[in-house]
Amino acid sequence: MAAKDRDRFSTTTRLRLLGEQTAARVYRSQSRRQDRRSRLTGRAALLALVLCTMVVALAYPIRQYVSQQGQIADLERQRQQAQERVEQLRDLKARWQDDAYAEQQIRERLHYVMPGETGYMMIDPNAAKQARADLGAAHRPWYANVWDGVDKSDASDQ
């Protein structure tokens, strides 16, 4: 027993026991850290997965929302333009209701004259040829366009 007690209290034995205890503590500490790391890594991965899922789930509705907002803005612009056009047409209709405006437009566009008046049209031959070539049928009197159409159809039949 004396040898056993000596071994128990010897420096070598105590150092060996102290080293084993320290190694056990270090091993336990490292395993706890690894457990914490693995749990934290698992949590982080789950959080990242949830965030990615939310981004993917919300991407299409947000894209649709932005697209629809653009369409709404376009429709509002078209509605505004249509409203302005309606106002212009109402103004034009109101002007045509006035007999003086209608008479002025008839005189100007159709070259009508009132009974007892004499209408004159002065045409420079060179200017008329150039104007006819430059302006085309839209800016000539209506009856000139009618006669040109008759002449062209008559010429094509022959």
Image (spheres, grey):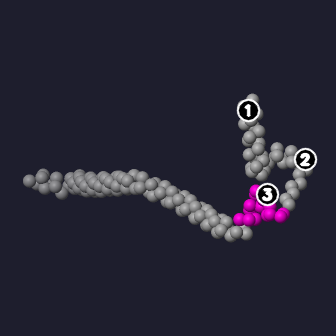
Residue 125: image tag: 2
Label 3 sits on what residue type? His
Q: Is-magenta flag for residue 17?
A: no
16 horizontally vs 105: left or right: left
Q: Residue shown at 91%/46% (left/top)?
A: 126
Sequence-earlier tag: 2 or 1: 2
Magenta stretch, residue numbers: 102-117
Q: Is-magenta flag for residue 116?
A: yes
Label 2 sits on what residue type? Pro
Q: Residues within 10 Å of mark 3 (few under 14, many from 20)?
A: some
Residue 96, position as x, y percentages in the image? 67, 66
Residue 156: image tag: 1
Q: Residues within 10 Å of mark 1 (few under 14, many from 20)?
A: few
User: Badges 2 and 1: C-beta atoms under 8 Å apart?
Assistant: no
In front: label 2 or label 1: 1
Residue at the disc numbered 3: 111
The image quadrant of residue 129 is: top right
Q: Residue shown at 72%/67% (left/top)?
A: 101
User: Considering the numbered disc 2 on the image, is that residue within a helix, a strand or a loop?
Assistant: helix
Q: Is residue 35 above or below residue 100?
A: above
12 horizontally vs 130: left or right: left
